[in-house]
Image (cartoon, rainbow, N blue to C red):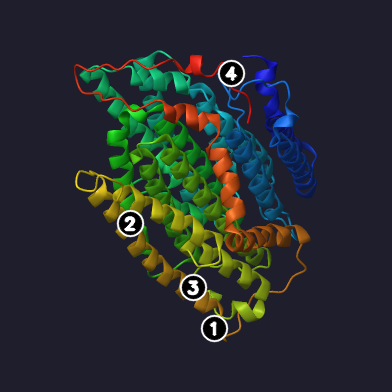
Amino acid sequence: MNFPTWHPLLPEFLLFTTGVLLSWGERKFMTPRAVWWAAMGMAVFALLLSLLAVSPQFWPHVGSVLDWELSHDLAARALRFFALFLGTLYVAMAYPEGRLTEPALGISGSLISLAGMGCVAAAQDVMVLLLGLELSLLPLYGNVLRGSDDRCRREAVVKLFLLGFVSCWCAAFGLSFLYGLTGTTRLLEIQAAMASGLEPGQMRLGLLALVLLFAGWGFRIGIVPFHFHLSDVFQGVSASSAGWLDFVAKLTGSIALLRVVVIALPAFSRWSWQLALALSVLSMIVSGLLAFQPGSPRRFLAHLSVHNGGVFCGGLAIALASSRGADVAAAVSHCWIFLLGYLLSSACVFAALQRLENGGFPLRHVEELQGMASARPGIAACATLGLLSMAGAPLLVGFWSKLHLLLGMLRVAWQPPLGDNPFTIHFLLLAAAMVFSSLLVWVGVLRVVLRMYEPVRATAKETNSSPWTWAAMAAPAILIVGMGIFPQAMAQRVDQAAQTDLIRIAQDLPTPDVEPGRTPVLPTVASRMESRTIP
């Protein structure tokens, strides 16, 4: 590990350093608005650096697709850019308007969390992955403290801390079992060691590790039965903090699951796809029933988060059940498209809620949305776009992302030979659960949207709002519509990232038959990477 290995993470290093300095400075001499300006300036600067890093010519000294600790392929660079882009919008969303009621420490902690997400996106080693996951999670406790109701805030902090600690323990133990089985912390070396054959006792330990990883990272993406904290946390914190929690947890948990379960553990795919499918069906059905009759807008968004976490788990099951490398890369691409669409839609809705909070109109029940379209047409329009996109409305990015996953489920279910296909019943059930739960979500979303457009005038106060908060709300709304109208441009770029050498190298290694008595020998990963260059 040397400087050329780590120097592409310069944006993350700058974010971490700035976040630490600001967390100290705001306690000593900096005003909340000065902290925000410093954080916003560094976030924009890091975003520009990351935009340059998407081009392979920007880092000419990195001579391979991946170093052993970090991956510098197109997928990692694109994920880091998207994380910084959306993180910059959330920082803009937290602009202190009027009388500040939230400590600025949450803003400085957001920069540290962004640095952790960059490490997760580039991680190719278990230790770097764990470092990034914890670096992205710990500042969330500071963001949760930015709520407005003391009792709800304390309850949210306790639940998030205790369940976050348990999930971290589960993931760390699962990864430690993988290290004990293989003797290495590098993901592709773990894959090669697993593919070389395991004894029955080792296989049972590997399955235990798989369950622990799903439990630990299932908490992050918010799937049933690891979702108990979401409703209370969303209810007890500010809108921007709830959106930040959803964004960080979903993105880092999804990256970890795809990198470890799909890329590093194809030897366990015969069990992992069943586990992912069961969690997906359970999450979609439970969240759909809860979202059918919306009460509190915050809790309704928590149910939508669980639903979309279940849909992502369905895409994970598609990738694990696919037999060819091209099919796996396509499934991974569809997962990224879905995640991108959901996080943009979520940011749009949470930005609209934050605008209402800044105007002195905190929402406690859906009934309070009556007449919002006539009192605040811009906020109502952005909230409507975000909600409809999460539900999968046509001509919006959410529709195409869900459609890709639904077609992927049907492709796996009907792949030849049809008579001997073990996936047919399971993936038809998964597709049916996705359609059924989406219909329930549609009903809940329409109830909320129609409530906003009822003729009764809302009592929201008109205030002079900052252009930064309007930009944080308008930017994802424009992207939702633009990607929905021109989905092919988005799909092509995501496909390019999913087809990088990191995915192809991993999926070119066939999944072995791990029954007793058979120990297939595969070529080492290092021998296959000697001549690889950055795409």
Across and down, in percent, residue 362 comes to: 59, 66
Judging by the rendered image, the residue that carries numbered circle 1 is 454
Q: What residue is shown with label 4?
A: 531
Q: Is residue 434 above or below residue 380?
A: above
Q: How many residues crowd around disc 4 within 10 Å: few (fewer than 14), some, or many (20 or more)? A: few
Cα separation, mark 2 vs mark 1, equals 34 Å
State the residue in front, 402 or 228. 402
> In the image, which is nearer the foreground, mark 3 or mark 4?
4
Q: Which residue is mark 2?
A: 431
Is label 1 in contact with label 4 (beta carbons under 8 Å)? Answer: no
Secondary structure category for the residue under label 2: helix
Q: CA distance from mark 3 to mark 2?
A: 26 Å
Q: Earlier in the sequence, mark 2 or mark 1?
A: 2
- Secondary structure beneath label 4: loop
Numbered circles on residues, count: 4
Task: Indicate whether 425 appears above or below 528.
Answer: below
Amino acid beneath label 2 = Ala
Is the residue under label 1 in contact with that under label 2 (CB below 8 Å)? no
Give amino acid for label 4: Ser
User: What residue is at 62 percent from the left and 40 percent from the top?
Assistant: 78
- Quadrant including the N terminus: top right
Residue where numbered disc 3 is placed: 448
User: Of 278 and 484, which appears nearest the observer?
Assistant: 484
- Disc 2 packing (10 Å; few <14; some 14–19; many ≥20): many
